[in-house]
Image: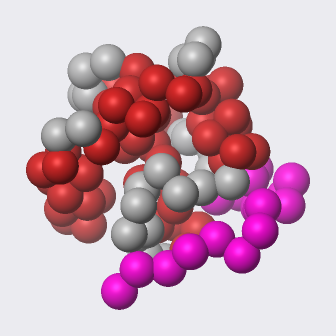
Amino acid sequence: VCGCFDGAPSAQELERCFFLDDEDRKLVAKRRGDANRLGFALQLTTVRFLGTFLDDPLDVPAGVLEELADQLEVADPSCVKRYVERSTTRWEHCREILQG
């Protein structure tokens, strides 16, 4: 079952659900390249916020993408478009997140 965002998260929701703690950062750091690190972080925090994964893992409010890009020091958040180029990557990441 997939969900969707109903508008942009509030500042408090961004801080609570989209903050990457040390454990999150360890998981994200295993990914190669900014696109995969940012894409993984999007999936990890989206499932935390919505309780489910998105049909399109990139279908997030701009503020969510910017917040995670800032935390990961990704200069160009638009690089995340490359995350979905290899279709199996997102599913592999979903499995890993669910197992974690």
Q: Which residue is at 55% across, 40% downward?
A: 21
Question: x and y percent of residue 33 in the render?
Answer: 32, 18
Number of numbered tags placed on the structure image: 0
Is residue 7 within the magenta segment? Answer: yes
Q: Looking at the rendering, in which quadrant would you find the N terminus?
A: bottom left
> Is 75 situated above or below 86?
above
Question: x and y percent of residue 4 in the render?
Answer: 56, 74
Residue 16 sits in quarter: bottom right
Q: Which residue is at 59% across, 68% downward?
A: 49
Query: Is residue 54 rendered to the left or right of residue 84?
Result: right
Q: Looking at the rendering, in which quadrant would you find the C terminus?
A: bottom left
Q: Say if residue 25 shows up in the picture.
A: no
> Is 6 situated above or below 94?
below
Residue 69 sits in quarter: top right
Question: x and y percent of residue 44 in the render?
Answer: 43, 54
Question: x and y percent of residue 65 in the render?
Answer: 62, 41
Is residue 25 within the magenta segment? Answer: no
Query: Is residue 66 rendered to the left or right of residue 56?
Result: right
Query: Is residue 32 rendered to the left or right of residue 42?
Result: left
Q: Which residue is at 69% across, 34% downward?
A: 66
Magenta extent = 1-17
